Image (cartoon, coloured by chain):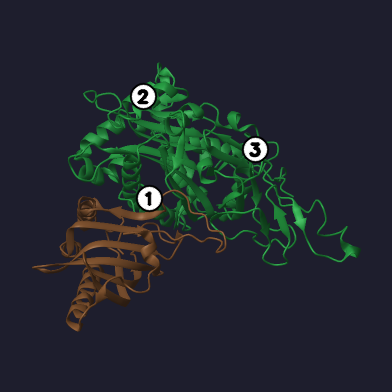
Amino acid sequence: MNQPHRTLPAGRDWVDVEAGTAARAIFTDQAIWQLEQERVFARSWLFLAHASELPQPGDYVTRQLSNDPVLVVRGEDGTVRAFHNSCPHRGTQLCRADAGNARTFRCPYHGWVFGLEGELKQAAYPPEIATLIGAVGDDLIAMPKVAEYAGLIFGSWDPDAPSLDDYLGDSRFYIDLFANRSPAGMEVLGPPQRWVFNANWKLGALNFGADGPHAASVHGPITYLTLNVPQDVVVQQLMHSPAVDIGKGHSCIFLELPPEAPDYAGFSPQLVPHYQRTLNAAQQRFMARGLTKVMTNFPNTSWVESSVRFDGTSAPVPFCNLRTWQPLGAQQTEVWNWLLIEKEAAEEFKQASYEIGIRTFSVGGTFDQDDAEAWAAINRGCRGTIGARYPVDFRGTRYYRDKPIADFHGPGTAYPSTYSEMSEFALLIHWQRVMQGKETS
Amino acid sequence: MNPQALRKTIPDGSVLDDGAFRAVYEFLSLESDCLGCGDLPAWQALLAPQIRYRVMAPAFMDAARPRHYGRGTPYFDDDADSLAIRVRQLSTPSFTIAENPPTIARHFVTNIRAARTDGGIEALSNVLVLRVRATEPEPAVVSARRVDLLVETPHGLRLASRLAQLDQVSVRQPNLSFFI
């Protein structure tokens, strides 16, 4: 039932790698969106939940992967499983709460009851037809692959998907910088925020994959207001900071602290010893000199961490943001947005980090609010008949493609400027290869 | 103020006389008009220095077995400093993309109840915000429950605390670049 279609025709070249351009239709066309639902989202590993959201047996959360409802539940054996959140009988959405704790799930329509492992426990039918319907084996549609890395629970609809470790590949080096940097690990500060913008999901994924130049033009003013950093300084930082093609569509950029700033200047002194104990030497170098890091795990899981203040004088407070871009349609996306914190952090610091995270990257955030406006503007510029005739432009990649940093100190291929757009274009090239069937995911 | 306060139907404290209630009504109306007319500095002037401004997300739970985790889901959690930055950002054309051209966000306030407490006047209200943006032909509607603490000053009432809860788990908006 959950087998992806393997016989769809190969897509055309939407991304012109040599020219450094892409067809605008990739952001607006419903047929392309439908194909990518099969080829990208039905095959890739998709972020479901953080382990701290369901700590006890019976704890569950409901999620939306594109337009499919998903139930994520921790069983009595402690294993987290994921199911299509629909009854196998009539397809009724089974669980309609955002989160909870249960021993069974009861379909609201005909009362079929399922256990925590998705097994059908009860369906009242006459014995004459009990072998046909409502019998053993009429279990919930299970997500065939569910696995956890650093508290991050991912799932894939593809039973033949590579292991999560293989899928994440070298990006685990960088994921550790966000989510695997203290002995006890991270926890969510609360349930996810959700909001909807009218534009394609790839615009969010590419933006976090990451688009360097927009950070100056879109976020320069609020960076000045909060941190008193002039826009030309932001531009210089972005121009001389690395963009990393990690491989397999995973991409990131890093902004480093100014040379005069001490190591770990953006982080809580209480937590630094945990980083030093947990991360390897190469990772510590990124953490110690890191100012801002932004990453997308292909296809639609993104990260941003930075430090900001709102009172003009105190030390900036870091926040760690994790989000997914759920494609509701070719031109509509729902953001699911979490904030993470070290379990070891002091309560006061957790609250401070939460407040800074909400004030910056959230639906009401001073940084996020302008991003969504820009993406919706791209949608309007690309969706018309005339607009669709023209490409979107990554031509700067033609200059940088043969100029990787020779001695970069992390995995992947790094380029010397976020203005190169090399990392986000690499994500797009990988997307095309997956769409053409040249990569499985 | 405890988030449970959002479930209150009667404000804490003693009954207000008609004159005091009228002042509360006038304050909430003035505040809403400042927001609706886009005069954010005037709105900011109605805030007390100790302002705590929170807007929370709701959660849909099984009524028999709810499970909340973490610290809830705020959409806003601000103080005077961060609100000052927000007002400056949203009021300066070159500092904002979301609010240039400015959104029309008309606030309709109803169900006002108020009582006098030791800390000031507690006012409960509902608010409906009709939002029209330059780029979207369809108006959007956002509604919320609010619990406010108003303090009396020589210049009139000032907002010292607002705890609001939006009525949408998934906000059907690209951003909340306006106040509730």
In the foreground, A248 or A341: A341
Task: Name the outermost residue toward the left.
Answer: B154
SS of the residue at dot 3? loop
x%, y% of residue A10? 65, 42
Determine which of the numbered discs, if any, sits on residue A437 in the image.
3
Residue at 23%, 36% (x, y): give it.
A315
x%, y% of residue B151? 18, 66
Residue at 53%, 58% (x, y): give it.
B66
Disc 3 residue crowd, few under 14, some 14–19, many 20+, Cα 10 Å: some
Q: Which is more foreground, mark 1 or mark 2?
A: 2
Amino acid under disc 2: Pro
Quarter holding residue A290: top left
The chain letter under disc 3 is A
- Mark 3 or 1 closer to N-term? 1
Amino acid under disc 3: Gly
Instruction: Tell me: A426 left or right of A81.
Output: left
Residue at 50%, 38% (x, y): give it.
A428
Can residue A306 be seen here?
yes
Which chain comes out green in the rendered image?
A: A
Instruction: Tell me: A367 left or right of A250.
Output: left
Q: Which colour is chain B painted?
A: brown
The chain letter under disc 1 is A
SS of the residue at dot 2? helix
Image position of A283 with respect to A382: above or below: above
